[in-house]
Image: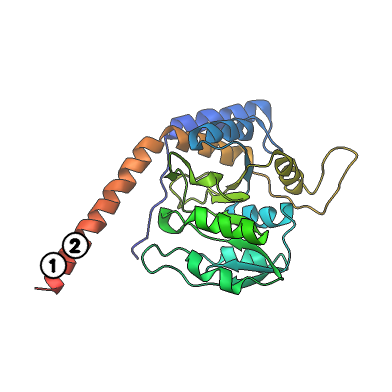
Amino acid sequence: MINVTKTYLPNKKKFIKYVDEIYKNGWVTNNGPMVTLLEKRLSKYLGVKNIVLVSNGTVALEIAYRALAIEGDVITTPFSFVATTSSLVTNGLNPIFTDIDSQTLNMDPRNIENIITPNTGAIVPVHVFANACEVEKIDALAKKHNLKVVYDAAHAFGVQYKGKSILNYGDVSTLSFHATKLFHSIEGGALIINDDGLVEKARYLINFGIENAESIPELGTNAKMNEFEAAMGLCMLDEMKFVNKKRKEVFELYKMRTQLQTIVTFQ
């Protein structure tokens, strides 16, 4: 079997150092120091205002839908991993597929407006293979029709557009930190949220709906990232320059071989 990619494992000694700290303080979950530090460092690294770490990318999407109180039909793309659609269905939402642009492989904004109905509640585009969606056109359509926008940005870690993170567009952008991703925390994910009030709502939704010791305002779930995953994330963040360099080398190799194959085919 030839794997699409292989999980990158960072410096083992550094990871063990973090693990020793976890053993020392006995704090393994529930917003421990590792999770807090990773949120702070990722916010700076990515150039985003608010980031909420969660247990995986699928639940990040689900929490986004709940936090935004999305209902009814949701326009999305079929060209994505199954979680983009299954997270909608499991939350009682009805996915409405629209076609993609043949060049970018992303949702084509020209196909969106003619399928918007009074029952449409949101748009869930996907940044495919780190190609940014046409965010300005999508956000303008959403504003015109009073729709929420949740970007599935599982492939868009670190992607920039006009000098700022692509994650800053829409109401929420979600990330996956699965082991095969450019940046990973073994398992994990995140929500990037511009609205400060929505951040607090997301934080209690990932903690069983518990806002404080006396208040459980909504039905939540257990979607918190644990300290061991955060420790891996901290190690990965220290080595992102090297990881990006190696991924670029692999990309260039595939590109070169594709070009050679094209030349041979047309000779």
Label 2, label 1: how many angstroms apart (C-alpha)? 6 Å
Q: Which residue lies furthest to the front in this view?
A: 144
Considering depth in this image, is 40 or 101 the residue closer to the camera? Answer: 101
Q: Which amino acid does the dot numbered 2 rest on?
A: Gln
**Residue 211, numbered circle:** none
Q: Where is residue 118 in the image (x, y as percent from the top left)?
A: 71, 71
Q: Position of residue 77 (x, y in %)?
A: 53, 68
Considering depth in this image, is 34 or 136 the residue closer to the camera? Answer: 136
Q: Say if mark 2 contacts mark 1, CB within 8 Å.
A: yes
Q: Where is residue 90 in the image (x, y as percent from the top left)?
A: 69, 67
Report which residue position mark 2 lands on. 259
Residue located 57% across and 34% down the image: 38
Q: Is residue 170 left or right of residue 15?
A: right
**Residue 263, numbered circle:** 1
Residue located 41% across and 65% down the image: 105
Q: Which amino acid does the dot numbered 1 rest on?
A: Ile
